[in-house]
Amino acid sequence: MHNSNPDALLSRELGTRQLAATIFNYTVGSGIFVLPAFAVLQLGTAAPLAYVACAIIIGLVVMCFAEAGSRVSATGGPYAYVETAIGPMWGFVAGCLVLATGTSAAAGVCNVLARSILTLAPGSPSWVYKVVVVLLVGTLVAINYRGVKTGARVIEAVTVAKLLPLLAFVFIGAFFIEPSNLAWTAVPEASTVLGTAGIVIFAFSGIEGSLMPSGEVKNPAKTVPRAAFMALGAATLLYLAIQFVALGVMGTDLAHDRTTPLASAAGSIVGPVGRTILVVGAVISMFGYLSANVLSEPRGLFAMSRDRFLPPILTAVHPTFHSPHKAIIIYGVIVASIALSGTYETLTIFANLSALMLYFLCAIAAYVLRKKDIRTDGEPYLTPGGPLVPIAACLSLSWLFYETVTLEQFVALAIVLVVVFVLYGLRTWRLKAAQTA
């Protein structure tokens, strides 16, 4: 039996600082430790242009999320925004996109993190990897089972721990920059910049999952916009600084190390110790991402269950910890299963495409929510520029999608969307049949 309002059983514990830390951890994962090499490979010394393009596009997207989040305070984040604005069918699509992105990305990061940990014990048998994956996911499930406040405290601590090596790299590396390494050899074409930005932008993604616990945010009309701008602004400045320093230290040689380019740059400055510190920083960063992921994503299962898309067991709220404990456990099982199955690489490709599609839906939702003047918890945040912002977001995302996505990937995404629509149709038919029975 569904509670008429399961959200009311959840505890509003997340303030601006905690939500900003969650968004920041979700955004700054493992990508920034690898992507600087890709950007240089594609654009040479003009690599920072990709980050500027990403910052502009993601800035438009964040403004849409900020207004939508200030108008709809229910648990579910983007899923709740889209469903409230343009109806349950598109809400279901958005919910599926968020869950596909979150689970596949978490499984991929979990795999890389477990293998990074095992480099400390070379020659370990294959079953040890499986044990490490289960222990990682199990630990994070246990932390978040005890409530959103406990999970948020872990995230705040990890945020500090992951920032230290990156900031040290920026501040120390700045003294070793060779200005000639930053000189542009050519101005790249806009299509090349956008094609590169289409990959780099996933170092900026994460807000879609980190806003899932909207039903546990204090004063969401003010907290969501503040936290979103704080976290994405900080991430953008950090990324640009890291790319400038890494390029300034190593020049186009940075493109030669596709696995640990930042660690190589640190090693060229202060030797093996610097390299080791950056590798450890990457491990901490990945753990921080997973912490934010396991805090946020189960709320998507909770929200879709609340709206009768998924079994009612997922709306269960722990009487003591006020957490959606069963959704958290089931989400952990899904992530661990994908990580252990080895199918995560295919799902990660889909996750990249689904993120762009989700941002597009959320931009439309922000436009509709403002037009209908929907407000569920206080005076909403009004985006400067009004309806022009979601329109600009949709146009820029469409251009990015066109420059980035191959025909095969587009067909794969279309097939997945058809499956989602069929599932929604079956659910609608089942509910109608139950009503007439």
Image (tube, rainbow, N blue to C red):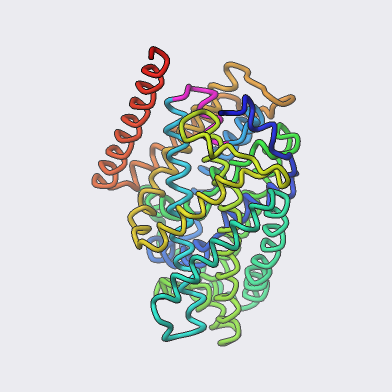
Q: Position of residue 143 (x, y in %)?
A: 65, 58
Taking the spot 43% from the left edge, 38% from the top edge, the residue there is 96
Q: Along the line of sight, which residue is nearer the eye, 168 or 417?
A: 417
Taking the spot 38% from the left edge, 61% from the top edge, the residue there is 42
Q: Is residue 262 above or below residue 316?
A: below
The answer to which image quadrant residue 179 occupies is bottom right
Write down the region rendered in magenta.
76-88
Would you say 237 lies left or right of 398 here? right
77 in the magenta segment:
yes
Taking the spot 48% from the left edge, 62% from the top edge, the residue there is 109
Q: Position of residue 116 (x, y in %)?
A: 49, 74
Q: Position of residue 261 (x, y in %)?
A: 48, 73
Q: Please, what is the dominant secondary structure of the magenta stretch? A: helix
67 in the magenta segment:
no
Q: Position of residue 106 (x, y in %)?
A: 48, 56
The answer to which image quadrant residue 240 occupies is bottom right
Classify the position of the N terminus by image quarter: top right
**Residue sitting at the far top:** 436
Taking the spot 60% from the left edge, 25% from the top edge, the residue there is 386
Classify the position of the C terminus by image quarter: top left
The answer to which image quadrant residue 343 occupies is bottom left
Q: Along the line of sight, which residue is nearer the eye, 213 or 258?
A: 213
Would you say 143 lies left or right of 398 here? right
Q: Is residue 59 above or below residue 126?
A: above
Q: Is residue 287 above or below residue 382?
A: below
Give the tally of numbered discs: 0
Q: Along the line of sight, which residue is nearer the eye, 297 or 178?
A: 297
